Amino acid sequence: MAIFYTYYSFCFYFFICYFFICAVLLIVAFSHFLIVLIFLDLLLLSNILLLILYTVVFNDSLGYVYALLLLGVAATETAVGLGLFIVYFKATGSVSFLNDQLIEK
């Protein structure tokens, strides 16, 4: 039984570290829109993995439903974000936020 909890505690700490690393990289690489979208998706994925881990540990099947709902939110966020990315790229010709061509026009 101790191995069971040791494995899940390792997974918990791994997913928490994964979340915070993605959050820090999101702040560091804020100048590129596409990288921000990728890190937002990774943040949502880490939350989904933590929710599934808690569902397995506490033997509650409702967590899987919430995980599927969060997965749908992540897919929708990706679709909307990539649509905005295309519009921004067509307007400015660049993917960088540091390039203020849209404001100058």
Image (cartoon, grey):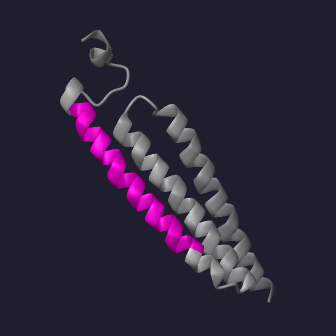
Magenta-colored segment: predominant secondary structure: helix
Image: 72 above or below 22? below
Please say if 93 is above or below 51.
Answer: above
Looking at the figure, which quarter contains the C terminus?
A: top left
Q: Residue 32 at what x, y percent from top left?
A: 37, 33
On the picture, is 47 further left or further right than 38? right
The image quadrant where one finds the N terminus is bottom right
Left/right placement of residue 49 relative to residue 32 reads right
Image: magenta residue range: 66-89
Q: Nearer the viewer, residue 51 or 16?
A: 51
Q: Position of residue 101 (x, y in %)?
A: 27, 16
The total of numbered circles placed on residues is: 0
Residue at the spot x=46%, y=32% of the render?
30
Q: Is residue 83 magenta?
A: yes
**Residue at (58% x, 79% y) in the render:** 64
Farthest-out residue, top: 104
* Residue at x-position 54% and y-position 34%: 27
Q: Residue furthest bottom?
A: 1
State the residue in front, 44 or 11. 44
Q: In this image, 30 relative to 22: left or right?
A: left
Residue drawn 37% across the image and 53% down it: 78
Q: Position of residue 98 (x, y in %)?
A: 37, 20
Residue ranking furthest to the right: 2
Q: Quadrant of residue 24?
A: top right
Q: Is residue 69 magenta?
A: yes
